[in-house]
Amino acid sequence: MPGDLDPSSTHPMHQSTSFSAESYFATQSAPPSLEQDIASVQAFVARQAAANRNVVLVTSGGTTVPLELNVVRFLDNFSAGTRGATSAEYFLKAGYAVIFMHRQFSLQPFSRHYSHSTNPFLDFLAVEGEGEGNGTVGITADKRTDADLLAVLTAYKGVQMAGSLHTLTFVTVNDYLWLLRAVSQELSVLRRRAMYYLAAAVSDFFLPRQKMSEHKIQSGKGSLHIEMDQVPKVLKPMVEEWTRDGFIVSFKLETDDQLLIPKARAALERYGHQVVIGNDLHTRKMQVVFVERKRKPLPPLPPGAEEPESEEAVVEVKEAAPALEAEGQPGTAAVSWLRIAPPAATTSTQVKEIEEDIVAELVRRHAAWITHDR
Ligand code: 9Z3
């Protein structure tokens, strides 16, 4: 048995095992659509490379953990997919090509403006000619919403024409992990021009297929006890093996705001990627915190010397963008808050979306990363 896993020696539901990423992929099955998805990503990345575009992988939405092989029940992670879908639109606007990897039926760029709960489609249409007795009824877009619809539709059609959006779906945390590895490996051919924006809400726990009941768990025995295993920490192999020089941004979600910065710092130190964006569940639409490594100032180069290539040979921390408030804390991480103003109670105009500023900030940092400034 590879790695540190030996499912045959464990009793289902009672003994937890620890999976490394390697043992995970050696023992859990790939989703049936994986090969087809990889081929589509390969073709997309090649087209974007030819068009000289930067590409960002945006993951979005929650992951499920099935409790049975013939799945009737599952656990789910909270996420509507707003962060991912909204950010994808701003990346497209900034000229990036986007691989949008999302939970099936979660929000998607552009169509998110007309979801079942936001501007439901039928409410948006008006009936003309009703009651005229000629048997014909015309349907038009409600005049009040014409301008908004036109803006969304124009952006959507532009992206379709440019072929700059590629969509992939997952449902379970297993689908997500297999897809994440495969897409990261394909995208790594772009080296520094690839960004990875991991906004999906990923379960920390799962039930390995070797421990799952084949059929629906029966209720006859009273209460249900399930011991789950920890999902392997894939950010480590993602940084060290799957992506080469890519710019990796992960999100850290907490509900206790006291934990947010310590946990985001710990993730940054543990995995060594570029940025962790911390968000509290309740305030996530109004504020987020950027945590990134502090950079050592460079010693001055001797006259005529070439700029060294090494990662350590980076210049001092760039000045924070105006929207960011730096937080002076000792340690190895730079911490800065990004906040948007709450909408005035009286205004009916569209509320500013924090993803606009998050993406602008990341595009700026990625550009510096590409030119080896950071
Ligand atoms: C996030 O923190 C996202 O910002 C939200 C977005 C899920 C809060 P919505 O889709 O919500 O707009 O409703 N995503 C990452 C959550 C996560 O699973 N992070 C892992 C962790 O916190 C690390 S990758 O340990």
Image (tube, helix red, strand yellow):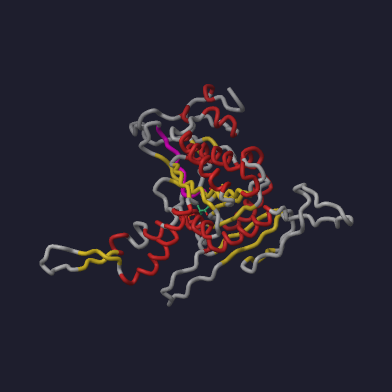
Name the quadrant of the N terminus: top right
- Image coords of residue 361 (percent x, y): 61, 61
Residue 373 vertical placement versus 342 (above, below): above
Q: Residue furthest right?
A: 303
Q: Residue furthest left?
A: 133
Q: Residue at x 50, y 60 (%)?
A: 282
Query: Image check: 298 left or right of 285?
Result: right
- Image coords of residue 71 (percent x, y): 37, 35
Query: Image check: 247 left or right of 103?
Result: right
- Image coords of residue 352 (percent x, y): 49, 68
Q: Which residues are magenta?
A: 59-68
Quadrant assignment, res 21: top right
Q: Residue at x 86, y 57 (%)?
A: 300
Q: Residue furthest bottom?
A: 346
Name the quadrant of the C terminus: bottom right
Membership of 286 in magenta stretch: no
Residue 341 vertical placement versus 242 (above, below): below
Residue nearer the viewer, 296 or 101: 101
Query: Image check: 55 left or right of 374?
Result: left
Residue 152 vertical placement versus 165 (above, below): below
